[in-house]
C-alpha cells in the first residue's frame, strides 16, 4: 500500500529492526489499557515505549510527528498513536494503533455511563459524584494555568486570549467562530511579524514532498468521509432525520472538525450546545461527565461519549433506554475519532513540507492562545455551577452573563474544592489520584452529612 512504501525511509536507520505487526499490535493494546493522565502523560508514555524502550522511532521523528498532530483538530495523543502506527506498518498499523488507543477507555466510559444513569439516587454513587465535581473544578483550573504558561508568550497572544474569553462568556459567540477568527489573525500576522506570535524568524528547510501525495490524500479523504458519514446516513434512513441519534451524529461530527485545544476547550462549546440548545443534560451533569472521563484510560475527549449516552438514554424510542444509550455512545465515539484518524491518513504525505510553513504555525499559535480564553470561560462556568446553587443565564441585547446568589455558596463543595486544590497544587498528586481521593471524600460527606 502507498503508506507502507514510505515506512522504511522514515524509520531511523540506527534503530532496531521494525517490529512485526503482531508485536506492535500487542504494544498498542497495552498502551491503550494504561494510558491514564491526559495528553501530556499519554504522549510521555508513548515516547518511553516507542522511542526509549523499543527504539522503533527516533527522537527527531517522534517530535516531528507530535508537531504535525498538534496542527490538526482532534485529540493529539490519539492522532500521534495513529501516525506512529502508520510510520511502522502503513495503513493497517495506523488503524490498529489509533483504535486500540481509545477502545479500552471507551468500554470503561460506557460502563461508567451505565452506572451513572442507573445508579443515581444511591447515596454512595451520589456522594462520589459530589466529590468528583470539586476535583473537576481544580483540574480545569490546573489546565488553564498549564496551557496559559505555554501559549501566552506575547502581548498579542494575551490579547487574543482575552478577546476569546469576552467573546464566548459575555457575547455567547460559538467556539468554531472563535477558532476561525484566531486562525485567520495568526495566519496574517505570521507573515509580517512572526515574533508577535512567539515564532522565530528562522525558516526550517524541508525535503521535497512525496510525488504521490495527492493520490494518497484523495483516496484517504474519500474513504474516510464515507466511513465517517455511514452510521449517520443509516440512522437517517432507518429512524428519520429528526431522531436523536442523527442529531448526536451531526453535532459531534461538527465538533470533531473544530476540536482544537483539547477536551477542556471543547467542553465550553459542548456544554453550551448540549445543555442550552439541545437540552440533553444539565450543567452539573456535564461536570460529572468530565470527572468520570478523568478516571478512564484514553483521551479525555471520551467525555463526549457520556453526553451521547445520556442524550439517547433519555430519548430512547423506539429502543429501550439502555439500548438507545449504548447506540448513542457508539455514534458519538465513531464520529469523534474517525475524523481524527482521517486527518492523519490524508495529511501524512504532506507532513514534511508543513514543517517549513510559518503561516500555519502562526495560525496554530493564535488558536492555542484563543483556547486559553475559552478554558478560562469554562473555569468560571464550572466554578459557578459547582460552588453555588441556582445559576441563571441572563441577557441584555448581545450581552450575556450569569446571575447567582452569593449567599447560596455551598460550603461543603467549597471545602472539597479547597482540599482538591491542596492535593493538586500543594502535594502535586496526579489527576486520577485527585479524582479518586475526592470521590472517596464525597462519599464520606454524603453518608455523614446527608444530601
Image: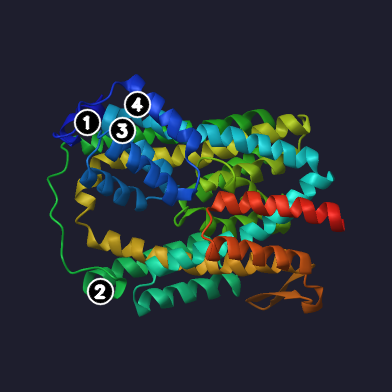
Q: CA distance from mark 3 to mark 4?
A: 11 Å
What is the secondary structure assignment of the residue under circle 3? helix
Q: Position of residue 230 (x, y in %)?
A: 52, 31
Q: CA distance from mark 3 to mark 2?
A: 34 Å
Q: Position of residue 431 (x, y in %)?
A: 55, 53
Residue sitting at x 52%, y 63%: 142
Query: Which residue in the structure is indicated by mark 2?
Result: 195
- Direction from residue 40 to residue 398 in the image, left or right: right
Q: Position of residue 382 (x, y in %)?
A: 65, 64
Would residue 320 be visible to someone looking at this image? yes
Instruction: Point out the frontmost of discs 4 and 2.
Output: 4
Q: Are marks 1 and 3 in contact (CB under 8 Å)?
A: yes
Q: Give the mark, 2 or 1, whose residue is nearer the N terminus.
A: 1
Q: Nearer the viewer, residue 252 or 296?
A: 296
Q: CA distance from mark 4 to mark 2?
A: 41 Å
Query: Which residue in the structure is indicated by mark 1?
Result: 7
Residue sitting at x 24%, y 39%: 349
Would residue 226 be visible to someone looking at this image? no
Amino acid at each position: 500500500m502507498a503508506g507502507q512504501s514510505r515506512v522504511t525511509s522514515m524509520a531511523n536507520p540506527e534503530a532496531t529492526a521494525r517490529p512485526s505487526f503482531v508485536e506492535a499490535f500487542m504494544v498498542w493494546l497495552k498502551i491503550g489499557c494504561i494510558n491514564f493522565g491526559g495528553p501530556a502523560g499519554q504522549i510521555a508514555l508513548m515516547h518511553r515505549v516507542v522511542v526509549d524502550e523499543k527504539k522503533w522511532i527516533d527522537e527527531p521523528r517522534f517530535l516531528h510527528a507530535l508537531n504535525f498532530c498538534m496542527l490538526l483538530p482532534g485529540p493529539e495523543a490519539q492522532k500521534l498513536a495513529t501516525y506512529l502506527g502508520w510510520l511502522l506498518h502503513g495503513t493497517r498499523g495506523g488503524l490498529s494503533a489509533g483504535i486500540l488507543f481509545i477502545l479500552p477507555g471507551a468500554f470503561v466510559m460506557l460502563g461508567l455511563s451505565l452506572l451513572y444513569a442507573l445508579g443515581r439516587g444511591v447515596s454512595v454513587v451520589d456522594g462520589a459524584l459530589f466529590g468528583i465535581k470539586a476535583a473537576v473544578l481544580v483540574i480545569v483550573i490546573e489546565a488553564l494555568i498549564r496551557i496559559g504558561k505555554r501559549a501566552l508568550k506575547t502581548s498579542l497572544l494575551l490579547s487574543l486570549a482575552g478577546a476569546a474569553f469576552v467573546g464566548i462568556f459575555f457575547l455567547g459567540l460559538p467556539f468554531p467562530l472563535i477558532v476561525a477568527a484566531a486562525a485567520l489573525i495568526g495566519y496574517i500576522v505570521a507573515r509580517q511579524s512572526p515574533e508577535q506570535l512567539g515564532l522565530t524568524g528562522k525558516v526550517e528547510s524541508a525535503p521535497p514532498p512525496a510525488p504521490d501525495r495527492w493520490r494518497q490524500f484523495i483516496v484517504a479523504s474519500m474513504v474516510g468521509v464515507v466511513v465517517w458519514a455511514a452510521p449517520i446516513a443509516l440512522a437517517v434512513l432507518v429512524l428519520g432525520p429528526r431522531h436523536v441519534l442523527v442529531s448526536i451524529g451531526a453535532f459531534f461530527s461538527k465538533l470533531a472538525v473544530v476540536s482544537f485545544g483539547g477536551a477542556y476547550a471543547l467542553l465550553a462549546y459542548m456544554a453550551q450546545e448540549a445543555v442550552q440548545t439541545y437540552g440533553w443534560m444539565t450543567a452539573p451533569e456535564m461536570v460529572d461527565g468530565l470527572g468520570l472521563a478523568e478516571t478512564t484510560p484514553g483521551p479525555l475527549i471520551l467525555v463526549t461519549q457520556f453526553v451521547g449516552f445520556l442524550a439517547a438514554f433519555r430519548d430512547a424510542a423506539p429502543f429501550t433506554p439502555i439500548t438507545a444509550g449504548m447506540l448513542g455512545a457508539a455514534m458519538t465515539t465513531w464520529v469523534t475519532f474517525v475524523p481524527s484518524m482521517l486527518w492523519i491518513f490524508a495529511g501524512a504525505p504532506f507532513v514534511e513540507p508543513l514543517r517549513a510553513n510559518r503561516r500555519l504555525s502562526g495560525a496554530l499559535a493564535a488558536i492555542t492562545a484563543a483556547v486559553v480564553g475559552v478554558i478560562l470561560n469554562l473555569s468560571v462556568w464550572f466554578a459557578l455551577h459547582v460552588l453555588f446553587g441556582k445559576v441563571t443565564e441572563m441577557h441584555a441585547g448581545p450581552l450575556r452573563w450569569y446571575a447567582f446568589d452569593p449567599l447560596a455558596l455551598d460550603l461543603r463543595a467549597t471545602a472539597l474544592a479547597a482540599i482538591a486544590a491542596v492535593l493538586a497544587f500543594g502535594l502535586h498528586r496526579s489527576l486520577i489520584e485527585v479524582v479518586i481521593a475526592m470521590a472517596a471524600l464525597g462519599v464520606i460527606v454524603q453518608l455523614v452529612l446527608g444530601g
